[in-house]
Amino acid sequence: MSQLFKYSFLVLIGACSYGVISTIIKLAYAQGFTVNEVIGSQYLAGFFMFLFCVILFSRKKASLKQALILFFTGITTSLTGIFYGMSLQTIPASIAIILLFQFTWIGIVIESIAEKKMPSPDKVLAAGILLIGTFMAGNIFGNDAWSLNDPGIIWGLLSAVSFSLFIFASGRVATELPSLNRSLFMSLGAAGFLLVIFSPEFLVNGSMQSGLWIYALLLGFFGVFIPVVLFSIGTPKIGSGIATILGAAELPTAILCSIIILKEQVTAVQIAGIAMILLGIVTPQLYYFLKWNIMKKKSISP
């Protein structure tokens, strides 16, 4: 049980780290930097962080097959950012975040299909609680909630699918390699793909010297380095279904950061939604804790 809580905690910290980046991105936008500059520099910085750590601390070599699989797995993380950004162009942020957080049940469905079995009751219950909490925390009942259009909805749902695939692959791809090596090739895939999609012009147009490097380092650390490492360590131990549920910690973290740092206002409904999400996150842990205690009592009873 202690091992389960340990690895669950690592994934939880990784999810919270993801939640920090929306506030940092908003601060970067306020300084006049574009989405291409911010997202591109984020993943490039994350890759160099992994490269530095692998050079210093790891001598394990990956095969060409392992490297390619991890490379393409990393693309799913950059696709999430691209799809989510495109959805924000045509639909309100409150709707876009709701669509992204459909990964909480999509990930459980993907795991069930892969393992050819129905999800456990605790996962179904947790997913239901998370969905309700997400709709509340995302302010779905706001005045702009219904200004929707089809392209934005599709992009938002695609962001949920790509994030679900990343969590699923994190627990299954090249798990025999050390986490740093796995993370290096995944970050290379994400950075390489983004630099192809987005022009790497920020490297030569003076943006880095104008302060972009500060946001690149922060985003690379909180949005690439920490979450990718912790997900790659924890997900193989707890399974992608539980990791998906824990990943929902991103939303309350993002809201809390926006309140504390950006001084944004939050409604009572959003606060209740955050509480619901936290309840959904701990539901599987409570289930396993109660189940473990029941089994323990049975084993020591005469």
Image (cartoon, rainbow, N blue to C red):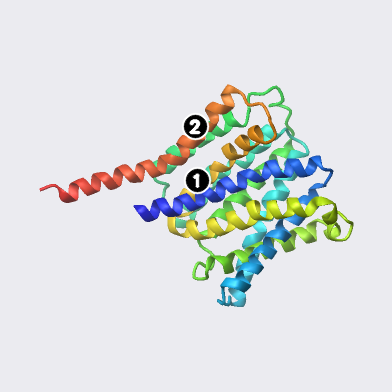
Q: Position of residue 277 (x, y in %)?
A: 51, 35
Judged from this view, the residue extending furthest toward the left is 302
Residue 78 seen anywhere in this rendered image of the structure: yes
Q: Position of residue 25 (x, y in %)?
A: 73, 44
Q: Nearer the viewer, residue 207 or 73?
A: 207
Residue 185 seen anywhere in this rendered image of the structure: no
Question: Up-down: is 243 above or below 287?
Answer: below
- The answer to whether residue 269 is left or right of residue 189 is left
Question: Up-down: is 145 above or below 185?
Answer: above
Mark 1 packing: few (<14 Cα in 10 Å), some, or many (20+)? many
Q: Nearer the viewer, residue 113 or 227?
A: 227
Mark 2 packing: few (<14 Cα in 10 Å), some, or many (20+)? many
- The answer to whether residue 173 is left or right of residue 126 is right
Q: Position of residue 151 (x, y in %)?
A: 75, 40
Q: Secondary structure at mark 1?
A: helix
Question: Up-down: is 39 above or below 133?
Answer: below
Q: Position of residue 235 (x, y in %)?
A: 49, 56
First-in-chain label (2 vs 1): 1
Mark 2 in CB contact with mark 1 (< 8 angstroms): no
Q: Which mark is residue 246?
A: 1
* Residue at x-position 60% and y-position 74%: 65
Q: Nearer the viewer, residue 109 or 16?
A: 16
**What amino acid is found at the position of numbered circle 1 in the picture?**
Leu
Judged from this view, the residue extending furthest toward the right is 205
* Residue at x-position 43% and y-position 43%: 123
Provide the residue designation for mark 2: 276
* Residue at x-position 30% and y-position 42%: 290
**What amino acid is found at the position of numbered circle 2 in the picture?**
Met
Q: Secondary structure at mark 2?
A: helix
The image quadrant of residue 197 is: bottom right
The image quadrant of residue 56 is: bottom right
